[in-house]
Image: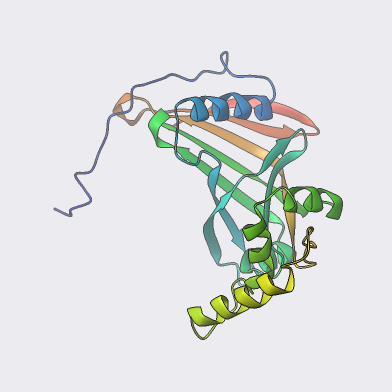
Amino acid sequence: MSKYAHLRLEYKKEKLSEESVEINPLTQFDIWFQEAMNAEVPEPNAFALATSGPLGIPSARIVLLKGVDRDGFVFYTNYNSDKAKDIAYNSHVSMCFLWHELERQVRITGRAAKVSRDESEIYFHSRPRESQIGAWVSPQSDVIASRDVLDQKLAEVTALYENTDIIPLPDHWGGYRVIPEEIEFWQGRPNRLHDRITYKNIDGHWKIKRLAP
Protein backbone atom coordinates (compact mmCIF):
# COMPACT_ATOMS: atom_id res chain seq x y z
CA MET A 1 0.00 0.00 0.00
CA SER A 2 1.20 3.51 -0.79
CA LYS A 3 2.56 5.48 2.15
CA TYR A 4 -0.03 8.12 1.31
CA ALA A 5 -3.09 5.84 1.27
CA HIS A 6 -3.40 5.39 5.02
CA LEU A 7 -3.21 9.09 5.85
CA ARG A 8 -6.69 9.95 7.02
CA LEU A 9 -8.39 12.10 9.65
CA GLU A 10 -12.00 12.05 10.78
CA TYR A 11 -13.55 15.53 10.68
CA LYS A 12 -16.15 16.24 13.36
CA LYS A 13 -15.65 19.72 14.84
CA GLU A 14 -18.51 21.73 13.32
CA LYS A 15 -21.60 21.64 11.12
CA LEU A 16 -22.70 23.93 8.28
CA SER A 17 -26.23 24.43 7.00
CA GLU A 18 -28.13 26.67 4.64
CA GLU A 19 -29.96 28.13 7.65
CA SER A 20 -26.82 28.96 9.62
CA VAL A 21 -24.94 30.95 6.98
CA GLU A 22 -25.19 34.66 6.23
CA ILE A 23 -27.12 35.94 3.20
CA ASN A 24 -23.99 37.58 1.79
CA PRO A 25 -20.96 35.27 1.29
CA LEU A 26 -18.50 38.10 1.95
CA THR A 27 -20.05 38.51 5.41
CA GLN A 28 -19.83 34.75 5.92
CA PHE A 29 -16.19 34.81 4.83
CA ASP A 30 -15.44 37.58 7.32
CA ILE A 31 -16.97 35.52 10.14
CA TRP A 32 -14.94 32.43 9.24
CA PHE A 33 -11.78 34.48 8.78
CA GLN A 34 -12.18 36.03 12.23
CA GLU A 35 -12.71 32.58 13.70
CA ALA A 36 -9.53 31.39 11.98
CA MET A 37 -7.66 34.32 13.53
CA ASN A 38 -9.16 33.59 16.94
CA ALA A 39 -8.04 29.97 16.58
CA GLU A 40 -4.53 31.25 15.79
CA VAL A 41 -4.41 29.50 12.43
CA PRO A 42 -0.94 30.27 10.97
CA GLU A 43 -1.25 32.85 8.20
CA PRO A 44 -5.03 32.56 7.79
CA ASN A 45 -4.79 34.99 4.86
CA ALA A 46 -2.68 32.56 2.80
CA PHE A 47 -4.53 31.08 -0.16
CA ALA A 48 -3.82 29.15 -3.34
CA LEU A 49 -4.38 31.28 -6.44
CA ALA A 50 -4.96 29.39 -9.68
CA THR A 51 -4.62 31.08 -13.07
CA SER A 52 -4.25 29.95 -16.66
CA GLY A 53 -2.67 31.57 -19.70
CA PRO A 54 -2.80 31.18 -23.48
CA LEU A 55 -2.02 27.44 -23.39
CA GLY A 56 -4.82 26.77 -20.93
CA ILE A 57 -2.43 25.11 -18.46
CA PRO A 58 -3.45 25.77 -14.83
CA SER A 59 -0.84 27.29 -12.54
CA ALA A 60 -1.25 27.65 -8.76
CA ARG A 61 0.77 29.36 -6.08
CA ILE A 62 0.29 30.60 -2.51
CA VAL A 63 -0.58 34.30 -2.22
CA LEU A 64 -1.50 36.47 0.78
CA LEU A 65 -4.91 38.15 1.01
CA LYS A 66 -4.53 41.84 1.89
CA GLY A 67 -8.08 43.09 1.91
CA VAL A 68 -11.77 42.24 1.56
CA ASP A 69 -14.49 44.73 0.74
CA ARG A 70 -17.98 44.60 -0.70
CA ASP A 71 -16.52 44.21 -4.20
CA GLY A 72 -14.12 41.34 -3.56
CA PHE A 73 -10.77 40.02 -2.40
CA VAL A 74 -7.53 42.00 -2.79
CA PHE A 75 -3.94 40.82 -3.16
CA TYR A 76 -0.75 42.47 -4.42
CA THR A 77 2.00 41.31 -6.76
CA ASN A 78 4.47 42.21 -9.48
CA TYR A 79 2.58 43.05 -12.68
CA ASN A 80 5.35 41.35 -14.69
CA SER A 81 4.97 38.04 -12.83
CA ASP A 82 3.64 34.88 -14.42
CA LYS A 83 0.36 35.18 -12.52
CA ALA A 84 -0.13 38.73 -13.81
CA LYS A 85 0.61 37.64 -17.37
CA ASP A 86 -1.98 34.88 -17.01
CA ILE A 87 -4.56 37.34 -15.65
CA ALA A 88 -3.88 39.74 -18.52
CA TYR A 89 -4.81 36.94 -20.92
CA ASN A 90 -7.58 35.30 -18.89
CA SER A 91 -9.04 37.22 -15.95
CA HIS A 92 -10.89 34.17 -14.61
CA VAL A 93 -9.13 32.94 -11.47
CA SER A 94 -9.75 30.59 -8.56
CA MET A 95 -8.80 31.05 -4.90
CA CYS A 96 -8.71 28.41 -2.18
CA PHE A 97 -8.24 28.92 1.57
CA LEU A 98 -7.56 25.94 3.86
CA TRP A 99 -7.95 26.41 7.61
CA HIS A 100 -7.04 22.90 8.67
CA GLU A 101 -7.29 23.62 12.40
CA LEU A 102 -11.01 24.36 11.91
CA GLU A 103 -11.52 21.65 9.28
CA ARG A 104 -12.64 24.33 6.82
CA GLN A 105 -12.02 25.32 3.23
CA VAL A 106 -13.28 28.24 1.16
CA ARG A 107 -13.16 28.19 -2.65
CA ILE A 108 -13.74 31.34 -4.69
CA THR A 109 -14.04 31.74 -8.45
CA GLY A 110 -14.28 35.10 -10.17
CA ARG A 111 -12.55 37.70 -12.28
CA ALA A 112 -9.39 39.56 -11.30
CA ALA A 113 -8.98 43.25 -12.14
CA LYS A 114 -6.26 45.70 -11.16
CA VAL A 115 -7.05 48.02 -8.27
CA SER A 116 -6.47 51.74 -8.72
CA ARG A 117 -2.95 53.13 -8.44
CA ASP A 118 -4.08 55.18 -5.44
CA GLU A 119 -5.17 52.00 -3.66
CA SER A 120 -1.86 50.33 -4.50
CA GLU A 121 0.03 53.40 -3.25
CA ILE A 122 -1.73 53.31 0.11
CA TYR A 123 -0.97 49.64 0.66
CA PHE A 124 2.59 49.87 -0.70
CA HIS A 125 3.53 52.59 1.77
CA SER A 126 2.00 50.62 4.65
CA ARG A 127 4.50 47.82 4.05
CA PRO A 128 7.84 47.57 5.88
CA ARG A 129 10.55 49.61 4.18
CA GLU A 130 12.48 46.42 3.36
CA SER A 131 9.45 45.01 1.53
CA GLN A 132 9.07 48.22 -0.47
CA ILE A 133 12.70 47.96 -1.54
CA GLY A 134 12.17 44.31 -2.38
CA ALA A 135 9.47 45.26 -4.89
CA TRP A 136 12.12 47.23 -6.80
CA VAL A 137 14.72 44.46 -6.54
CA SER A 138 13.05 41.33 -7.88
CA PRO A 139 12.24 40.83 -11.60
CA GLN A 140 9.61 38.30 -10.50
CA SER A 141 9.39 35.09 -12.56
CA ASP A 142 12.41 36.02 -14.71
CA VAL A 143 15.34 33.60 -14.91
CA ILE A 144 18.36 34.90 -12.97
CA ALA A 145 21.92 33.59 -12.95
CA SER A 146 22.27 33.23 -9.18
CA ARG A 147 21.26 34.55 -5.77
CA ASP A 148 24.09 37.05 -6.13
CA VAL A 149 22.01 38.90 -8.73
CA LEU A 150 19.38 39.68 -6.11
CA ASP A 151 21.90 40.51 -3.41
CA GLN A 152 23.72 42.96 -5.68
CA LYS A 153 20.47 44.59 -6.80
CA LEU A 154 19.34 44.83 -3.17
CA ALA A 155 22.52 46.67 -2.25
CA GLU A 156 22.08 49.05 -5.19
CA VAL A 157 18.43 49.87 -4.46
CA THR A 158 19.07 50.22 -0.73
CA ALA A 159 21.85 52.72 -1.46
CA LEU A 160 19.70 54.55 -4.01
CA TYR A 161 16.93 55.24 -1.48
CA GLU A 162 19.16 55.54 1.59
CA ASN A 163 18.35 59.23 2.08
CA THR A 164 14.76 59.02 0.80
CA ASP A 165 11.90 58.98 3.26
CA ILE A 166 9.25 57.87 0.78
CA ILE A 167 10.12 55.08 -1.64
CA PRO A 168 8.08 55.47 -4.84
CA LEU A 169 5.64 52.80 -5.95
CA PRO A 170 7.07 50.89 -8.94
CA ASP A 171 4.96 50.99 -12.10
CA HIS A 172 5.29 47.21 -12.26
CA TRP A 173 3.78 46.55 -8.82
CA GLY A 174 0.23 46.78 -7.51
CA GLY A 175 -2.97 45.07 -6.52
CA TYR A 176 -5.73 42.94 -7.98
CA ARG A 177 -9.28 42.58 -6.76
CA VAL A 178 -10.97 39.25 -7.38
CA ILE A 179 -14.66 39.97 -7.97
CA PRO A 180 -16.37 36.74 -6.91
CA GLU A 181 -18.90 34.92 -9.03
CA GLU A 182 -19.15 31.81 -6.84
CA ILE A 183 -18.01 31.10 -3.28
CA GLU A 184 -18.12 27.69 -1.63
CA PHE A 185 -17.81 27.07 2.12
CA TRP A 186 -16.68 23.55 3.06
CA GLN A 187 -16.89 22.12 6.56
CA GLY A 188 -15.36 18.74 7.30
CA ARG A 189 -17.82 16.14 8.67
CA PRO A 190 -17.60 12.49 9.73
CA ASN A 191 -17.60 9.63 7.19
CA ARG A 192 -16.40 12.01 4.48
CA LEU A 193 -19.96 13.35 4.21
CA HIS A 194 -18.80 16.94 4.39
CA ASP A 195 -21.01 20.04 4.38
CA ARG A 196 -20.70 22.18 1.24
CA ILE A 197 -22.67 25.41 0.94
CA THR A 198 -22.20 27.40 -2.25
CA TYR A 199 -23.21 30.95 -3.17
CA LYS A 200 -23.62 31.82 -6.84
CA ASN A 201 -24.10 35.36 -8.12
CA ILE A 202 -27.07 35.39 -10.49
CA ASP A 203 -28.02 38.81 -11.87
CA GLY A 204 -26.51 40.58 -8.88
CA HIS A 205 -28.16 38.35 -6.28
CA TRP A 206 -26.54 35.56 -4.27
CA LYS A 207 -28.28 32.17 -4.52
CA ILE A 208 -27.42 29.65 -1.79
CA LYS A 209 -27.37 25.90 -2.48
CA ARG A 210 -26.06 22.78 -0.79
CA LEU A 211 -23.72 20.51 -2.77
CA ALA A 212 -23.15 16.82 -2.22
CA PRO A 213 -19.70 16.08 -0.77
Question: Where's the C terminus, which quadrant?
Answer: top left
Q: Residue at x 60, y 67 (%)?
A: 56
The correct choice, above or below, for 187 with respect to 111 in the image is above
Q: Position of residue 136 (x, y in %)?
A: 69, 69
On screen, residue 154 versus residue 71, left or right, reads: left
Q: Nearer the viewer, residue 51 or 210?
A: 51
Which quarter of the figure has residue 77? bottom right
Q: Position of residue 212 (x, y in %)?
A: 46, 30
Residue placed farthest to the bottom in the image? 145
Q: Residue at x 54, y 47 (%)?
A: 47
Visible residue check, residue 207: yes
Residue placed farthest to the left in the image? 1
Q: Nearer the viewer, residue 130 or 26?
A: 130
Which quarter of the figure has residue 72? top right
Visible residue check, residue 54: no
On screen, residue 72 versus residue 29, left or right, reads: right
Q: Position of residue 46 (x, y in %)?
A: 53, 45
The chosen color scheme is rainbow
Q: Residue at x 37, y 27 (%)?
A: 193
On screen, residue 70 versus residue 211, left or right, reads: right
Q: Position of residue 24 (x, y in %)?
A: 69, 24
Tally the numbered discs: 0
Residue placed farthest to the front in the image? 163
